[in-house]
Image: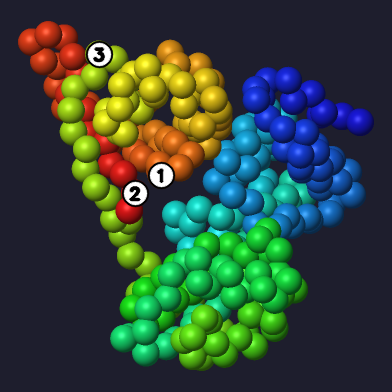
């Protein structure tokens, strides 16, 4: 088969390799048989790997879309060359759950209720939680099941088709500021978690740290401004800015922790 050399991607699992190889098969099918293919919902890491693989074979007629701008979980559509790309073609649907504002639902509440219906995670896109309304993007094959939901936990809900953009809220952050000797991941994690560099290094070498959704065990990996990183058990962070250099040549940085 063509296009199966994925050696330029490091630290990816066999499952990732199978997934990406399938996407490359789709580019062959699009070019040779004019077939359009759609994936299940992909997480941020899988989307990033997908973009790298498509760039490696210089295939541009594809779309990653999750139902709204800046979505995290997205579906891949591989179109034949020269076909028009249309977001409305995606086999997904938005469902809005409405409930009393005094009732509170969490992302976990909604996800748990939907997975209790035997819906797999890859059939569900982003879940956006608001006051009195929450939205979930779903694969069209499970839309009827999701629309049938009338209760999430102890909260009565009314499901309706469509996306209420008012539900989208800006991410909330806790700012962490301080100085680091460099933008090495061990220094940045040390500041983010308020632990020593030695303890940060243990976490990194133990595979608990991802930078831009890729695990790294290198303590000397550099983090760029604007990159996200996560530490298993501690949460997700963003290196927002470098704010200057101290008289001891240490960098003043601002880290945002997602809350």
In this figure, which residue is indicated by the disc labeled 3?
181
Mark carried by residue 258: 2
What is the x, y in percent for residue 196? Answer: 31, 21
| Disc on the earlier residue, 3 or 1 | 3
What is the x, y in percent for residue 219? Answer: 45, 16
- Residue visible at 37% across and 89% down? 100
In this figure, which residue is indicated by the disc labeled 1?
235
Q: Are discs 2 and 1 less than 8 Å apart at CB?
A: yes
Mark carried by residue 116: none
Q: Residue farthest to the top?
A: 248
- Residue visible at 65% across and 25% down? 11
Vertical placement of residue 65 versus 231, above or below = below
Vertical placement of residue 84 versus 180, above or below = below
User: What is the secondary structure assignment of the residue under circle 1?
Assistant: strand
What is the x, y in percent for residue 91? Answer: 69, 68
| Disc on the earlier residue, 2 or 3 | 3
Q: Residue 239's quadrant in the figure?
A: top left
* Residue nearer the viewer, 112 or 144: 112
């Amino acid at each position: 088969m063509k296009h199966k050399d994925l050696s330029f991607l490091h630290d990816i699992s066999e499952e990732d390799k199978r997934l990406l190889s399938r996407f490359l098969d789709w580019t062959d099918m699009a070019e040779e048989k004019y077939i359009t293919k759609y994936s299940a919902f992909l997480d941020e890491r899988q989307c990033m790997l997908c973009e790298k693989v498509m760039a490696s074979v210089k295939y541009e007629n594809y779309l990653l879309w999750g139902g709204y701008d800046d979505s995290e979980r997205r579906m891949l559509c591989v179109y034949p060359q020269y076909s028009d790309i249309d977001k409305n073609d995606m086999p997904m649907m938005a469902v809005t759950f409405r409930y009393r504002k005094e009732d509170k639902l969490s992302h976990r509440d909604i996800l748990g209720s939907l997975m209790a219906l035997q819906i797999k995670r890859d059939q569900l896109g982003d879940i956006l939680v608001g006051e009195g309304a929450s939205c979930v993007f779903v694969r069209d094959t499970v839309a009827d099941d999701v629309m049938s939901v009338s209760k999430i936990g102890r909260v009565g809900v009314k499901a309706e088709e469509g996306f209420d953009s008012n539900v989208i809220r800006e991410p909330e952050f806790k700012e962490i500021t301080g100085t680091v000797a460099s933008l090495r991941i061990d220094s940045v994690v040390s500041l983010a978690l308020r632990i020593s560099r030695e303890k940060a290094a243990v976490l990194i070498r133990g595979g608990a740290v991802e930078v831009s959704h890729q695990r790294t065990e290198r303590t000397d990996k550099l983090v760029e401004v604007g990159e996200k990183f996560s530490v298993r058990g501690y949460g997700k962070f963003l290196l927002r800015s470098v704010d200057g250099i101290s008289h001891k040549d240490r960098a003043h940085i601002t880290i945002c922790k997602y809350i």
